[in-house]
Every structure is written in structure tokens, then in C-alpha cells.
Amino acid sequence: MRRHVFVISLIVALPVLFFGAVSSAVADEPPAPVAGLVEVGRGELNWFGLGVYDAHLYTTSGRFEGLQSGRIALEIRYERDISSEQLVETTRKEWRRLAGSLQLNDPARKETWLEAVGAIWPDVSDGDRIITVVEPDGPTRFFGNAGALGVIDDPEFGPALLGIWLHPETRVADLRAELIGSE
């Protein structure tokens, strides 16, 4: 009788173990929006010891050669709840801080961009992600957990947004070093 219980337990457990392993392996694969791109680097942003998000940078060559060098994707996997309004306000503050470095001298244009991302970006929670894909001299596309979120067609928007993380004067220099593979 014990042998039958063991065999039945094993039969019930194997699919759970197998499918659990498959689902965790799939979670580590690059998401569909970055198909054809190669990961350059990854890093984590912490705030006072608390995880805020993990970030992954992808390019066509697997190297970061500047914000205007080709198709670039930045994937951010959040570890805490952040409202869309907070994401937009943080973007506003960083653009204000980097205005001269990123040549963001048109306040009306920045406000138009901020309104657009405010309509695109969702509130995020632990486990959510937003993927930003910047096409060279083209649109910037946003993807979330369930697929496409929206597009901003202005070709200058994407490099300005990615500059928050990738410009040499970024506030998150350690994260930048990890993302561009220089650490």
C-alpha cells in the first residue's frame, strides 16, 4: 500500500515540478519586444536598501554605443508599487536636472511628452514591467505585462527618456555602469 501511495504522489508531483521549472525558465527569457536584441547589461536600483526595480538594457549589437546608435530597449521590472503619476513626476524632475546635458530646452515639448507618457504608463506593482523600445530616428514603443501600451512618434523623445539612465551625468551612475557593461 505504501508503494502505491508513493507512486501516486510521484505521478501527481512530477507535472507540478516539471511545469514549475518550465515557467521559471520562461520568466528568465527575454520578452518578445526585445526579440532580435542582445542584452548589454543589467542592474538593480535600490533606495535606502529597498529594491525599487531591476533594469535590463538591450541593443542590436550587445554593446552600448550611445543613445543614437540603433535600436535600444530598456526593460524595467518593478519591485514596489509606483503610480503612473509618480513615474511621470520623476521623469519631469530628471529631465529638469539633465536639461542642459540632454539639450531639453523646449518646455512645451517636454510637457507634451510628459502628458503622452502619463496616458501610456500604468500604475505598477511588484512584478510588473515596462519595456521601452527606441527605434533609430523613429518612434518609441512601450510594452507592459500584457503587451503593447502605446507609442510616441517623436524621434527625439526616446533618446531623451533613456538619457535618464544612460547619460554620463545620470543620477544613477552605478546602475548606468551595470547597464552599459562597463562595470
Image (tube, rainbow, N blue to C red):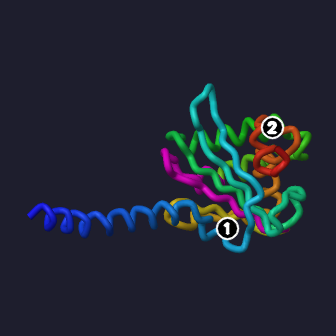
Does the magenta portion include 159? Answer: no
Q: Residues within 10 Å of mark 2 (few under 14, many from 20)?
A: some
Q: Which residue, given by chain and number where applicable, does mark 2 sit on?
A: 173
Q: What residue appears at the point 81 percent right and 51 percent down from the top-left corner?
A: 180
Q: Nearer the viewer, residue 81 or 12?
A: 12
> Against 68, is 80 above or below?
above
> Against 32, is 115 above or below?
above
Q: Give the total number of marks visible in the rendering.
A: 2
Q: Could you tell me which quadrant the C terminus lies in?
A: top right
Q: Secondary structure at mark 1?
A: helix
Instruction: Point out the residue furthest to the top here.
Output: 48
Please give the label number shown on residue 67.
Answer: none
Can I make out residue 164 in this image?
no
Tell me how far mark 2 sits from mark 1, CA to CA.
24 Å
First to last magenta residue range: 116-136
Q: Which residue, given by chain and number where applicable, does mark 1 sit on?
A: 34
The answer to which quarter of the image holds residue 33 is: bottom right
| Horizontal and vertical percent position of residue 13 | 28, 63
Can I make out residue 112 in this image?
yes
Instruction: Point out the residue furthest to the left here.
Output: 1
| Horizontal and vertical percent position of residue 154 | 78, 63
Three-letter amino acid code of the residue under disc 1:
Val
Q: Is residue 183 left or right of residue 124?
A: right
Q: Could you tell me which quadrant the N terminus lies in?
A: bottom left
Does the magenta portion include 124? Answer: yes
